[in-house]
Image (spheres, grey):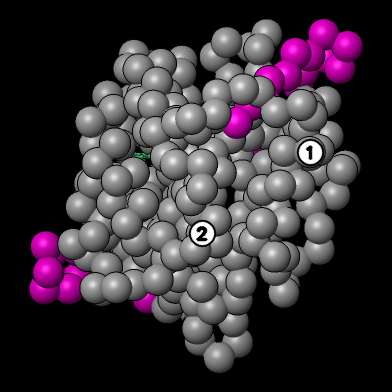
Amino acid sequence: MSALRFSSRFNPMLSNTILVQTKSLLFSFSSFSSSVRKPCKTLCCSTNSLLHTNGGTSNSSPLSEDELVGYIFGKKKATEVAHLVWRHVLHKGDIVIDATCGNGYDTVAMLKMVADESGHGRVYGIDIQTEALENTSSLLDETVTQKEKELVKLFPICHSRMDEVLPENTAVRLVAFNLGYLPGGDKGIITTSKTTLLALEASKKMLILGGLISLVVYVGHPGGREELETVEAFASGLCVDGWICCKFQMLNRPLAPVLVFIFKR
Ligand SMILES: C[S@@+](CC[C@H](N)C(=O)[O-])C[C@H]1O[C@@H](n2cnc3c(N)ncnc32)[C@H](O)[C@@H]1O
């Protein structure tokens, strides 16, 4: 694991371093907040409100209908939709957090969105398992340049402690969670409702205006459904004036991952 190096605080490792039959698909898109709990009328209407509130981004084209409709018609995975939404929030040079690095696919995706040629942009990658960070580091080696990799800092800690490893007053544009267990790893090591809630609270404090908390929530394993309820309760409790919170969920695939986006206006 030559690409990882250690820093003095908390012994963190600092790295320099993606179905369904169309006709039978049922789809749910809803927004929720503390005072308003009604489903949005249409997918387009709700999505536009999310995307345009940010005033647009300089480095991306509008989220095309094809891309979103691809999810409805089973051609896009939940993680792909998450990446599409990130692209509309992020700018080159932004600071972002991958709160569950896993095998590194999300880390690489967000790095590509924020890394600029002058060395700005930063990805703070967190995972409770060293194995996951090793996988992430390896994927970075295979897919990005050394210069891009140097913008990634990896920390083997619980994401509930993210505020301890980021420099004070760091302006974070995106905190992404891909909950559950490490694919190909120990299925006994999973995210939990308690620490996920703590991490959401920490994320809320660090996020800048126009920033996003993105979650892919898996419900097929023990504790997964409860974790989704925790995430939904957290998002439902945020004030309408400051936050736009929405959920994408397959209705006829009860074990399909659920997407939650929490956007800070
Ligand atoms: C579904 S995987 C993430 C997939 C990853 N984002 C990717 O692109 O490959 C979930 C990860 O969360 C990690 N995890 C579990 N509990 C955690 C915690 N409390 N803090 C940080 N990471 C945790 C697991 O070790 C696992 O690697």
Label 1 environment density (alpha carbons within 10 Å; few <14, some 14–19, many ≥20): few
Q: Position of residue 208 (x, y in %)?
A: 45, 65
Q: Position of residue 194 (x, y in %)?
A: 23, 31
Q: Identity of the amino acid at label 1?
A: Cys
Vertical placement of residue 31 versus 89, above or below = above
Q: Is mark 1 within 8 Å of ligand 1?
A: no
At horizontal 54% and vertical 29% (from top left) the residue drawn is 36
User: Taking the image as drawn, is residue 107 in sight?
Assistant: no
Give the mark nearer the N terminus: 2 vs 1.
Answer: 1
Image side of residue 69 versus residue 198, left or right: right
Q: Which residues are magenta?
A: 2-31
Residue 101 vs residue 250, the one in the foreground: 250
Q: Which residue is mark 2?
A: 211
At horizontal 54% and vertical 66% (from top left) the residue drawn is 111
Measured in 3D between alpha carbons, the distance from the residue under mark 2 to the one under mark 1, in whole angstroms, is 20 Å
Residue 77 found in image quarter: top right
Q: Which residue is mark 1?
A: 45
Q: Check if residue 217 falls in the magenta segment.
A: no
Image side of residue 173 versus residue 4, left or right: right
Q: Single out the mark in the foreground, 2 or 1.
A: 1
